[in-house]
Amino acid sequence: ISPKLYGRTDLKQYFQGCRTLTNWRVMPHGGVTKRAGTRYIAEVKDSAHAPRLIPFIFGVTQAYVIELGYDGSTGYMRFYMDQGQIQLSGSPYQITTPPWAEANLFEVMFAQSNDIMYMAHPSQPPKQLTRTTHTAWALTTYTVTATFDPTPPFTATNDYPGSVTFIQQRLAWAASNNNPQKIWLSR
């Protein structure tokens, strides 16, 4: 409840609210429910460096969690599914080529369509993460296939987009350092 209602015991809302709500979620239609618990699945690659967890949801039965991290020398991506870490020959499956510096991991923007996730940060060329199978993921640099713009986008350091999303089924890149108000849309 608002601090303005702390002394208003004459209102019924006073008895239906609370000052602090811990381990509960407020439902959009009203009421509260207990917050879901957590389960230990695996240790991150390097506990000295905080990773970022990103959802990758293809469908009801194919949902993943991506551990986007930095192990002190290079970036990496590790993958989780069905309450476990995806393994390849007894070692966790991972990609060790993500270019983002540790300080930029939480600034990477992403948008997903089916088995492809597009990732943007203004200090790196845009990336495309593709899933073929549970143990076949590829991170490549996104390339523009056709453009009517006389200057091709995403070719210089300050021209890389800092944001990505989908707008009416069109891929949209935006917010480069040189053009923070510009938006590039697919056809």
Image (cartoon, grey):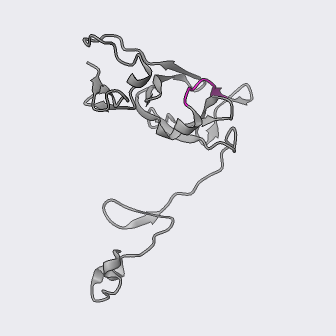
State the residue in front, 18 or 82.
Answer: 18
The reply to whether the magenta stretch includes residue 96 is yes
The reply to whether the magenta stretch includes residue 7 is no
The residue positioned 46% from the left and 70% from the top of the image is 21
Is 66 above or below relative to 152?
Answer: below
Q: x and y percent of residue 147 in the render?
A: 29, 12
Q: x and y percent of residue 65 in the render?
A: 54, 38
The residue positioned 63% from the left and 25% from the top of the image is 96
Looking at the image, residue 132 sits to the left or right of residue 94; the answer is: left
The residue positioned 62% from the left and 30% from the top of the image is 76
Looking at the image, residue 86 sits to the left or right of residue 36; the answer is: right
Q: x and y percent of residue 149 in the render?
A: 26, 13
Is 143 above or below relative to 61?
Answer: above
| Count of marks overlaid on the render | 0
Q: Quadrant of the N terminus?
A: bottom left
Q: Quadrant of residue 8?
A: bottom left
State the residue in front, 71 or 114.
Answer: 71
Q: x and y percent of residue 63 in the render?
A: 50, 36
Looking at the image, residue 159 sits to the left or right of residue 22; the answer is: left
Looking at the rendering, the stretch of residues picked out in magenta corresponds to: 93-100
Looking at the image, residue 111 sits to the left or right of residue 38; the answer is: left
Which residue is the extreme one toward the right?
90
Q: Quadrant of residue 153?
A: top left
Provide the major secondary structure of the magenta segment.
loop
Is 185 above or below relative to 85?
Answer: above
Q: Quadrant of the C terminus?
A: top left
The residue positioned 61% from the left and 30% from the top of the image is 75
